[in-house]
Amino acid sequence: MGASVLVVDDEPQVRGLICTLVESRGDRCLLAGDLATARRILADEEVQLVLCDVELRGESGLDLVGWLQLEHPTVAVVMVTAIDDAVFAEKALGLGAYGYIIKPFRTNDVLIAIQNALRRRTLELATGEGLATAREGLRASEEETIHRLALAAELRDEETGHHIARVGRSAGLLAERLGFEPKAIERLRLASQLHDLGKIGIPDEILRKTGLLSRVERAVMERHPETGYRIMRESDSPLLKAAADVALNHHERWDGAGYPFGLAGDRIPIGARIVAVVDVFDALTSARPYRAAYSVDEAVAMMAAARGRQFDPDVLDVFLESLGDVLGPGLPQSSDARAAARPAVV
């Protein structure tokens, strides 16, 4: 089936001649003598191409070109003009016209212009869809990379695998409550799941030790932020770059007493400050080889006591205010968690 082509010209003879040529191709022809009529047709009909005169009794066809770019960007437009001028042509093409036909025109001028405009439109639409598919494929590929790297950590330590999934969910929720843009929320949700990726490089005898770590073992364990950073830092992916920054900085403290660099306050990236809060909460409320899990109420009290020292006070406050939502599927539960959270930050 042919295309639908709208011919806009205030001269009936010109409209009729162009319409005859359009229909000779097997295309459907619609007619308008002014811009108001053209806009009404475009609002009601599915049109692929507009052939528009430039001078329309006090109106300019160029106005239609600009309007189409805003309201109907998938509609191709070719200008029909008696003005054979390079400056005009540049202006028309700059506004988005696919081409122009000079009056008086020959039959082949019109047919070639129609064919070229429709072919270009088809290619541009296909390219646009292809780019959208490619972008979605890239995003899916990056997300798969995150999950596969997380799985590698889970194979070393089963609890770490569950822990990173919970941290990702909580970090995304907290980013939303802190007013992040949707893309930034999703990026942190995924990136935060790799905050402990560097534990891949920790020996089993340290990672799975049932007793407290010695000073030397603690020093080895504290290398994992830099190890995770080195694994991901060379990636061209913005997502993995964000994950590298979170991995490197999530053990820094608000008061500067953290590691590996002793950053303090706003010098710590906000994503890492968020992960620091949700990471510690999940760690406290989960059993470890060397201790039992703390209750939600105990964990809240311990974290509130570290407000402004270990944790960004604003981030911690929002976290505690959101605790009822944080305690979702797969996270430790407490019937009075909200009650515990409110007085703890006073």
Image (spheres, rainbow, N blue to C red):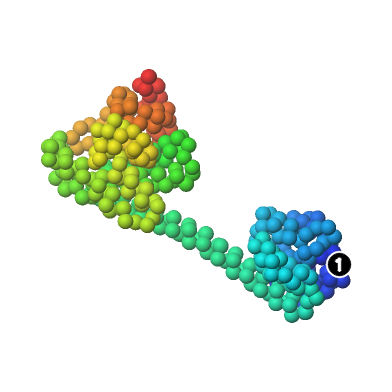
Examine the rendering and report whether any part of residue 193 can be seen: no
On the image, which quarter does residue 168 sit in? Answer: top left
* Relative to 312, residue 227 above or below: below
Question: In screen coordinates, is 65 left or right of 165?
Answer: right
Q: Position of residue 85 (x, y in %)?
A: 72, 70
Asked whether the viewer can see residue 122, the reply is: yes
Q: Amino acid at mark 1?
A: Glu
The structure residue drawn at horizontal position 78% and vertical position 59%, both measured from the top left corner, is: 60
Seen as rendered, the residue at the extreme right is 12
- Looking at the image, residue 201 lies above or below residue 89: above
Determine which residue is flagged by label 1.
11
Q: Nearer the viewer, residue 254 or 104?
A: 104
Residue 104 or 218: which is nearer the viewer? 104
Q: Secondary structure at mark 1?
A: loop
- Which quadrant holds the N terminus? bottom right
Which quadrant of the rendered structure holds the C terminus?
A: top left
Residue 176 in the image: x percent, y percent?
46, 38
Left or right, 20 with reference to 296: right
Looking at the picture, how far across and down is residue 229, in whole percent?
Answer: 28, 49
Q: Tell me the residue at 83%/69% (across/down).
A: 15
